[in-house]
Image (spheres, rainbow, N blue to C red):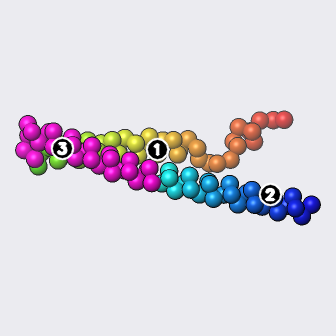
């Protein structure tokens, strides 16, 4: 019995270490994606700066980013409102 518990503990420790390494790799990937998106936004600004003044190109990119962020915030707020209150209202309302 003790040997099986020791084996299970050893196995779970190894799995935990692998899971932690995987989480670290995902975190590293997320950081690189963050910087990659920044580089793409910089590229978009530079491309616009070829036909517009640089300040106007940067302003356009910023306004588009704020518009997308606002849309996502509104969608998130609507989704959050649909999920509140976090109780099973339909199950409580049914007569059973």
Residue 23 figure quarter: bottom right
Q: Circle 1 sits in a helix, a strand or a loop, which is it? A: helix
The spot of residue 56 in percent (x, y) is: 12, 45
Q: CA distance from mark 1 to mark 2?
A: 42 Å
Question: What is the CA distance from the residue labelled 3 to the residue labelled 2?
Answer: 55 Å
The answer to whether residue 48 is above or below residue 1 is above
- The residue under label 1 is 76
Disc 3 vs disc 2: which is toward the camera?
A: 2
Which of disc 2 and disc 3 is earlier in sequence?
A: 2
C-beta proximity under 8 Å, tags 3 and 2: no
| N-terminal label among 1 and 2 | 2
- The part of the image, by quadrant, that contains residue 61 is top left
Q: Estimate the x, y position of residue 25 in percent, counting from the top left.
A: 50, 53
Residue receiving disc 3? 45
Pinpoint residue 58: horizontal percent, then vertical percent: 17, 47
The structure residue drawn at horizontal position 38% and vertical position 51%, both measured from the top left corner, is 32
75 sits to left or right of 20: left
Q: Earlier in the sequence, mark 3 or mark 1?
A: 3
Image quadrant where one finds the N terminus: bottom right
Residue farthest along the right direction in this orientation: 1
Magenta segment includes 1: no
| Closer mark to the observer between disc 3 and disc 1 | 3
Neighbours of disc 2 within 10 Å: few (<14), some (14-19), many (20+): few
The residue tagged 2 is 8
Q: Secondary structure at mark 2?
A: helix
Please state the extent of the stretch shown in magenta in the rendering. Answer: 28-54
């Amino acid at each position: 019995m003790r040997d099986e518990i020791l084996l299970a503990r050893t196995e779970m420790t190894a799995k935990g270490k692998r899971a932690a390494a995987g989480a670290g790799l995902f975190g590293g990937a997320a950081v690189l994606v963050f910087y990659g998106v920044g580089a793409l936004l910089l590229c978009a600004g530079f491309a616009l700066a070829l036909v517009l003044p640089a300040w106007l190109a940067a302003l356009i990119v910023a306004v588009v980013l704020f518009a997308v962020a606002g849309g996502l915030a509104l969608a998130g707020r609507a989704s959050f409102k649909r999920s509140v209150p976090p109780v099973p209202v339909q199950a409580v309302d049914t007569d059973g």
